[in-house]
Image: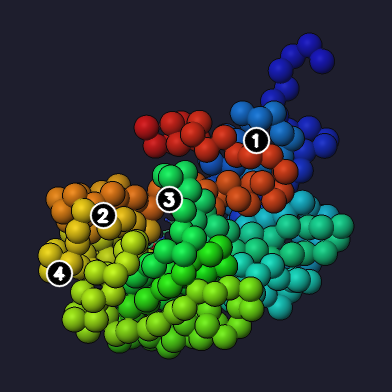
């Protein structure tokens, strides 16, 4: 062909994202940049889809025999009954963000926790046998707890506020202790209001993680840590928040001399894990980071 006719042709494969609201999502830019960079013939498009349309959408994706798709809120839990199989990441989390079509069978995965663990690896941190104190039990904190336990974490202490999420924290602890046969991780749950317990658990932890939206709008400038004497220089402090890039918690941790990691890497690597499932190729994460965030 003499002219550059663009990237889309008769063989281009669609990867969809189904969520609502969707306009703010960074995933289409991230995946399309990566497809272009690696010369892969895929296109990633976001669609405004809620629970009401979800079953029809999955039926449509099966009929089109797409390679896979992402779902985000409010569909991460509701999609489970429409899939053929769940990988451990999704089964223990009770949520799916990535679907892969393996010869007509739709397999659900949850790559958020994988992205978290992989990002730690990229920072030279191996979680094997380590202890983590984690705040939260929602959509971000749950896959962090589950995947860390699946990937060799030794101990996890989960702190949750006395709200609707406390039961989910108890459930996550039960799943890690009782249902994960191959894991030796020991999990405990505490109310976030118990500051003495928080101090004690952080004191014996290698990693402290904020898995809540505290620190991000509308809670910008707030931190899950009130007493910064709980932080010490050899503690690794991570946050799911990436906007702002340095949350109040990470500011406190930096002032205390801790190694700090924000939520940007988790977000990029959860996409990279999905990308790898669909294409069998590693996403050029450093390139994407430079293009999108630097
Ligand atoms: P969610 O609503 O599912 O869960 C919120 C959690 O925060 C719950 O455990 C809740 O108890 C806790 N919480 C809320 N307000 C609190 C407060 N004032 N004090 C203490 N705990 C509080 O939300 P989510 O989907 O888990 O998202 C949480 C944050 O994580 C958001 O800021 C989101 O942008 C971010 N996130 C980041 C990534 C990433 O890849 N970095 C991925 C998903 C979500």
Residue position marked by numbered label 3 in the rendering: 125
Asked if residue 264 is positioned above or below residue 114 in the image, the reply reads: above
Horizontal and vertical percent position of residue 15: 69, 49
- Residue nearest the viewer, comparing 103 with 202: 202
Horizontal and vertical percent position of residue 60: 78, 62
Asked if residue 233 is positioned above or below residue 29 in the image, the reply reads: below
Characterize the local packing of mark 2: few (<14), some (14-19) or many (20 or more) Cα atoms within 10 angstroms. few
Image quadrant where one finds the N terminus:
top right
Horizontal and vertical percent position of residue 228: 14, 64
- Disc 2 and disc 4 in contact, CB within 8 angstroms: no
Whole-angstrom CA distance, mark 2 to mark 3, is 12 Å
The residue at the point 34 percent across, 50 percent down is: 261
Q: Secondary structure at mark 3?
A: loop
The residue at the point 51 percent across, 51 percent down is: 118
Marker disc for residue 35: 1
- Residue nearest the viewer, comparing 185 with 60: 185
Whole-angstrom CA distance, mark 2 to mark 4, is 19 Å
The residue at the point 64 percent across, 78 percent down is: 181
Q: Earlier in the sequence, mark 1 or mark 3?
A: 1
Residue position marked by numbered label 4 in the rendering: 226
Between circles 1 and 2, the one closer to the viewer is 2
Between circles 2 and 4, the one closer to the viewer is 2
Q: Earlier in the sequence, mark 1 or mark 2?
A: 1
């Amino acid at each position: 062909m003499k002219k550059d006719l663009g990237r889309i042709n008769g063989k281009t494969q669609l990867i969809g994202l189904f969520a609502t609201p969707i306009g703010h999502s960074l995933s289409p830019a991230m995946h399309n940049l990566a497809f272009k960079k690696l010369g892969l013939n895929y296109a990633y498009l976001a669609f405004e889809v809620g629970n009401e349309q979800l079953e029809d959408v999955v039926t449509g994706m099966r009929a089109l025999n797409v390679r896979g798709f992402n779902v985000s809120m409010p569909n991460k839990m509701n999609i489970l009954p429409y899939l053929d199989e769940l990988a451990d990441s999704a089964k223990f989390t009770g949520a799916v963000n990535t679907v892969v079509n393996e010869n007509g069978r739709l397999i659900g995965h949850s790559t958020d926790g994988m992205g978290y663990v992989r990002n730690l690896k990229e920072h030279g941190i191996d979680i094997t046998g380590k202890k983590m104190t984690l705040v939260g039990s929602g959509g971000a904190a749950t896959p962090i707890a589950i995947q860390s336990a699946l990937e060799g974490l030794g101990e996890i202490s989960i702190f949750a506020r006395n709200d609707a999420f406390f039961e989910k924290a108890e459930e996550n602890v039960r799943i890690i202790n009782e249902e994960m046969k191959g894991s030796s991780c020991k999990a405990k749950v505490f109310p976030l209001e118990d500051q003495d317990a928080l101090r004690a658990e952080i004191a014996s932890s290698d990693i402290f993680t904020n898995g809540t939206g505290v620190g991000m709008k509308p809670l910008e400038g707030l931190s899950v840590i009130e007493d910064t004497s709980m932080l010490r220089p050899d503690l690794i402090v991570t946050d799911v928040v990436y906007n702002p890039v340095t949350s109040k918690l990470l500011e406190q941790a930096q002032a205390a001399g801790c190694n700090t990691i924000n939520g940007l890497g988790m977000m990029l690597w959860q996409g990279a894990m999905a990308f790898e499932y669909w294409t069998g190729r590693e996403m050029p994460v450093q390139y994407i980071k430079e293009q999108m965030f630097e």
